[in-house]
Image (spheres, rainbow, N blue to C red):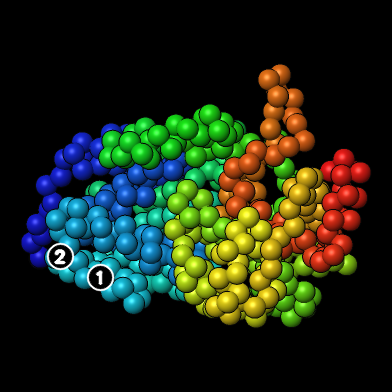
């Protein structure tokens, strides 16, 4: 039998406060919803590296909604955890698959995505039992049935007295409508054998003061979003600007082929705000918008933006960009983004654009996680008495602004007619 060197770990020093019960829990469902910066993913990674070494019968399956997102998230976190525990030399990291092997025993950490469920149901391991699942960013799983298919892959038994099976879910709680709330947090309807907690950035003693100040400032600038981002509470539907959206799986290529009408928009930022791009299929006949792709990144230079558009094969596409950045638009056009043009802006243009979007049924592809977040947190302002105003809070709307720009061609006059368009909008009080 292989002699294994166990890591000597002090939870207080390694995982910090707030996760002691999580670390030791062995119930079948172990669920953590939390705010940004609450170290839930890092703690889960540390816990699983430690447990793989401790329990020689265990193998772990790590899933996300899309398999290609594992490499830059869960795989990287687990590799970081092995280095943090000073045991990386005991693991083989195969980045191309990706896959992690514990060398002393051959136990495996496998990575899959729900975009290919057949690869999950057919998984087998050479050593021990596939008995643990970590579902990261579980909020992206719009289909509870697909999740339950993964749970069914946790099968088999072992004669070890400390054997246990477990499914761990970690996520940010963007909307109270999601099935995760009903299944794991609501006392009347939740499943059996569930351990569920909520964590916040306040338990993360390693956050720097800049990050802490950013979270704290949300209570002043956008209190409703602070409940989710800073407090880890469920997003509440009340006051949402858009009620007409749905997260739905669909084939973008098939949808483009079927409808043959696409539109693209961009919003520009740098240090504090991201540069965004959003692509949609527009079904004008049935009043439907199918959002199928997004980009969301801070600190992008002109060349970075050009490279992304080239990668997305949008250099020849008609794109509407934020008119507040005319120099950037000119630079991109000179580089070869020939059909990039400025958005229409003026008094009433925001409300008019929002009203136009509200007339559609909007479907969001599950891969567009920033779009999903914005639609679930973009709310109207309230007055001092709590009355809703017909003015949205100008925050967390960078994808939505890009979408609004992209749809201008369907309701705004072009060229010389722009002034007439604004006069008409103003006469309508928009």
Q: State the residue at coordinates (72%, 76%).
A: 256
| Tag 1 residue | 93
Image-based side of 81 in relation to 180, left or right: left
- How far apart, in angstroms, are the residues tagged by discs 1 and 2? 10 Å
Position of residue 334 relative to residue 360, above or below, is below
| Position in image of residue 52 (x %, y %) | 24, 57
Of 213 and 293, nearer the camera is 213
Mark 1 is surrounded, within 10 Å at the Cα level, by few (under 14), some (14 to 19) or many (20 or more) other residues, namely some
Element assignment for label 2: helix
What label sits on residue 270 in the rendered view?
A: none
| Position in image of residue 117 (x %, y %) | 52, 70
| Position in image of residue 200 (x %, y %) | 41, 35
Of 323 and 292, nearer the camera is 323
| Tag 2 residue | 90
Position of residue 84 relative to residue 203, above or below, is below
| Position in image of residue 236 (x %, y %) | 63, 36
Q: State the residue at coordinates (66%, 58%).
A: 323
Image-based side of 153 in relation to 207, left or right: right
Image-based side of 68 in relation to 335, left or right: left
Quadrant housing residue 325: bottom right
Q: State the residue at coordinates (26%, 51%).
A: 46
Q: Is residue 426 visible?
A: yes
Mark 2 is surrounded, within 10 Å at the Cα level, by few (under 14), some (14 to 19) or many (20 or more) other residues, namely some
Q: Quadrant for the N terminus, please.
A: bottom left
Q: Quadrant for the C terminus, please.
A: top right
């Amino acid at each position: 039998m292989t002699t294994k060197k166990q890591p000597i770990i002090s939870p207080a020093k390694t995982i910090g406060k707030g996760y002691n019960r999580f670390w030791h829990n062995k119930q079948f469902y172990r669920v953590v919803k939390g705010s940004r910066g609450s170290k839930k993913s890092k703690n889960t990674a540390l816990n699983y590296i430690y447990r793989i070494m401790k329990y020689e019968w265990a193998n772990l399956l790590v899933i996300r909604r899309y398999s290609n997102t594992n490499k830059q998230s869960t795989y990287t976190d687990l590799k970081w955890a092995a280095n943090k525990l000073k045991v990386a030399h005991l693991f083989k990291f195969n980045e191309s698959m990706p896959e992690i092997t514990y060398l002393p025993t051959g136990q495996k950490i496998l990575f899959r995505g729900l975009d290919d469920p057949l690869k999950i149901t057919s998984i087998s391991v050479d050593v021990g039992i596939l008995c643990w699942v970590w579902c990261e960013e579980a909020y992206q799983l719009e289909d509870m049935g697909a999740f339950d298919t993964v749970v069914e892959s946790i099968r088999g038994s072992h004669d070890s007295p400390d054997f246990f099976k477990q499914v761990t879910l970690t996520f940010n709680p963007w909307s109270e409508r999601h099935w995760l709330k009903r299944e794991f947090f609501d006392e009347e309807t939740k499943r059996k054998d569930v351990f569920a907690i909520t964590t916040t950035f306040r338990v993360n003693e390693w956050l720097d003061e800049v990050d802490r100040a950013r979270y704290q400032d949300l209570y002043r600038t956008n209190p409703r979003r602070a409940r989710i981002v800073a407090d880890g509470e469920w997003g509440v539907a009340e006051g949402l600007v858009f009620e007409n959206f749905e997260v739905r799986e669909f084939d973008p290529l098939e949808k483009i082929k079927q409808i043959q009408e696409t539109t693209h928009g961009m919003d520009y930022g740098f240090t504090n705000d991201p540069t965004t791009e959003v692509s949609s299929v527009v079904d004008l006949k049935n009043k439907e918008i199918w959002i199928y792709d997004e980009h969301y990144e801070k600190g992008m230079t002109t060349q970075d933006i050009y490279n992304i558009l080239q990668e997305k094969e949008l250099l020849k596409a008609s794109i509407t960009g934020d008119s507040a950045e005319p120099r950037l638009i000119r630079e991109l056009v000179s580089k070869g983004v020939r059909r990039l043009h400025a958005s229409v802006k003026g008094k009433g243009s925001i409300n008019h654009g929002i009203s136009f979007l509200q007339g559609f049924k909007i479907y969001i592809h599950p891969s567009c996680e920033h779009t999903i977040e914005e639609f679930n947190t973009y709310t109207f302002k309230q007055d001092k008495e709590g009355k809703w105003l017909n003015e949205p809070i100008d925050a967390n709307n960078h994808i939505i602004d890009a979408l609004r720009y992209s749809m201008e061609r369907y309701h705004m006059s072009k060229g010389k007619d722009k002034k007439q368009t604004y006069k008409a909008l103003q006469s309508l009080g928009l």
